[in-house]
Image (cartoon, rainbow, N blue to C red):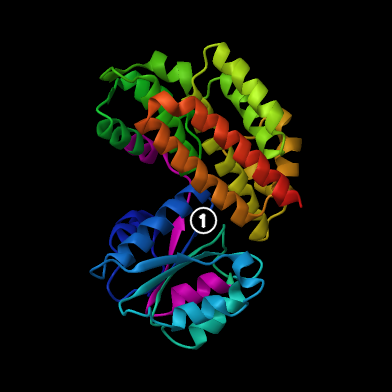
């Protein structure tokens, strides 16, 4: 199968051809890579009725079982049906391992792999672009048109309407990472709860707000393993009128950025290069903390943290009366996980 063009990536992602059973999702936008990989895995799963099982296998899962990814792809589920295996390129899940899989022929299970910014000459990319039953999907930074479309879609789903000026200001303040852009739009939706129209003043009030630095300091303390400091500063922020929802979204944004950095490093980039590619750019006051956290947290640990935070954000939306305890519990759990990562 030929390489999927960037202009056709969204269409391919929503409905991969029936002949395709393995997809590499790669590019500079880690948030979009993760989003599209999930969409493709879900699309693969829906080919069966009931939907096929989706399992994740990461580098750390292969430390004790180096052949597990290959074995999972070659074996069928006990009760029949298909199986979707999802993974991320790293130290063990690399071009050599993928070559072993491709040389054995089309596996009975479906495969979705997330990669970084891979060049056309990269071995893994050439494998997926060269096999008749595979494909490689690029994910590059959203254009202004993409960002406007995402904002309109999310606002419509939330029952909001963006004023024309508000749309212009919002797009200017969104970054080059799909997940972070969605997080900023979600924050705007929460801020305008109870109103239909979103104005430019609303956007200026919360998107890219300076108070983000205060929230980032709280999250950074938790990411360093200092739960006591994080809770103390969180209590102060709440007493000053900040919403626990704001902290939850700050946690989501912060850990997605950490995940993006760790993923780029595991994919072969240097920390400095990975840091320079982040959008919005890293503030100089955060660089040392992010660098240290990126070294102490593993990609798997960050993936689990992001999943835990996403669950808490969803729970807080459904149960606003317990959003403060949820945020506090999450800070404690993340700090404990940070200390465990260092050990």
**Would residue 124 appear left or right of 335 to someone viewing this image?**
left
Q: Which residues, given as a range, are shown in magenta?
A: 123-149
Q: Position of residue 303 (x, y in %)?
A: 55, 52
* Vertical order, 7 against 243 (above or below): below
Viewed as shown, does residue 145 lie left or right of 223? left
Relative side of 97 to 82, left or right: right
The picture places residue 174, in percent across and down from the top left corner, at 47, 32
Q: Where does the image place residue 135, in percent across and percent down from the top left?
A: 41, 70
Residue 124 is covered by the magenta coloring: yes
Q: Residue at x 47, y 54 (%)?
A: 33
Does the rendering let one see residue 73? Answer: yes
Along the line of sight, the residue nearer the viewer: 50 or 252: 50
Give the x, y percent position of residue 259. 59, 48
The residue at the far top in this view is: 240
Q: For residue 313, what is the image quadrant?
A: top left
Residue matched to label 1: 27
Q: Residue at x 64, y 26 (%)?
A: 231
Residue 241 in the magenta stretch? The answer is: no
On screen, residue 196 above or below 300: above
Furthest toward the bottom, the residue is 104
Image position of 263 (left or right of 166)? right
Residue ID at (32%, 38%): 149
Does 331 appear above or below 124? above
Callout 1 environment at 10 Å: few (<14), some (14 to 19), or many (20+)?
some
- Residue under the point 40% across and 16% down: 202
Which of the pair 160/3 is nearer the observer? 160
Is residue 275 shown to the viewer in this render? no
Local SS, label 1 = strand
């Amino acid at each position: 199968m030929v390489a999927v063009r960037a202009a056709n990536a969204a269409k391919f992602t929503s409905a991969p051809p029936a002949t395709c059973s393995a997809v590499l999702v790669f590019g500079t936008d880690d948030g979009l890579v993760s989003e599209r990989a999930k969409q493709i895995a879900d699309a693969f799963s829906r080919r069966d009725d009931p939907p096929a099982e989706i399992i994740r296998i990461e580098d750390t899962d292969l430390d004790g079982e180096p052949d597990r990814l290959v074995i999972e792809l070659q074996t069928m589920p006990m009760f029949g049906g298909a199986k979707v295996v999802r993974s991320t390129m790293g130290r063990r899940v690399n071009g050599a391992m993928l070559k072993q899989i491709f040389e054995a022929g089309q596996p009975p299970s479906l495969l979705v792999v997330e990669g970084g910014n891979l060049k056309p000459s990269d071995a893994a990319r050439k494998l997926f672009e060269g096999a008749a039953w595979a494909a490689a999907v690029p994910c590059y930074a959203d254009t202004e048109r993409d960002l406007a479309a995402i904002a309109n879609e999310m606002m419509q789903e939330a029952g909001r309407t963006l004023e024309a000026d508000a749309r212009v200001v919002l797009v200017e303040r969104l970054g080059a990472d799909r997940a972070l852009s969605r997080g900023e739009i979600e924050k705007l939706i929460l801020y305008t709860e109870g109103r239909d129209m979103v104005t430019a003043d609303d956007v200026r009030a919360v998107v890219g707000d300076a108070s983000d630095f205060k929230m980032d300091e709280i999250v950074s303390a938790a990411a360093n393993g200092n739960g006591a400091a994080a809770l103390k500063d969180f209590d102060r922020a709440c007493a000053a009128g900040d919403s626990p929802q704001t902290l939850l979204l700050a946690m989501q944004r912060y850990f997605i950025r950490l995940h993006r950095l760790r993923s780029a490093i595991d994919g072969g980039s240097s920390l400095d290069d990975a840091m320079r590619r982040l959008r919005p750019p890293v503030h100089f006051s955060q660089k040392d903390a992010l660098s240290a956290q990126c070294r102490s947290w593993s990609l798997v640990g960050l993936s689990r943290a992001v999943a835990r935070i996403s669950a808490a954000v969803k729970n807080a939306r459904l149960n606003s009366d317990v959003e403060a305890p949820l945020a506090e519990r999450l800070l404690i759990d993340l700090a404990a996980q940070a200390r465990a990562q260092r050990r």
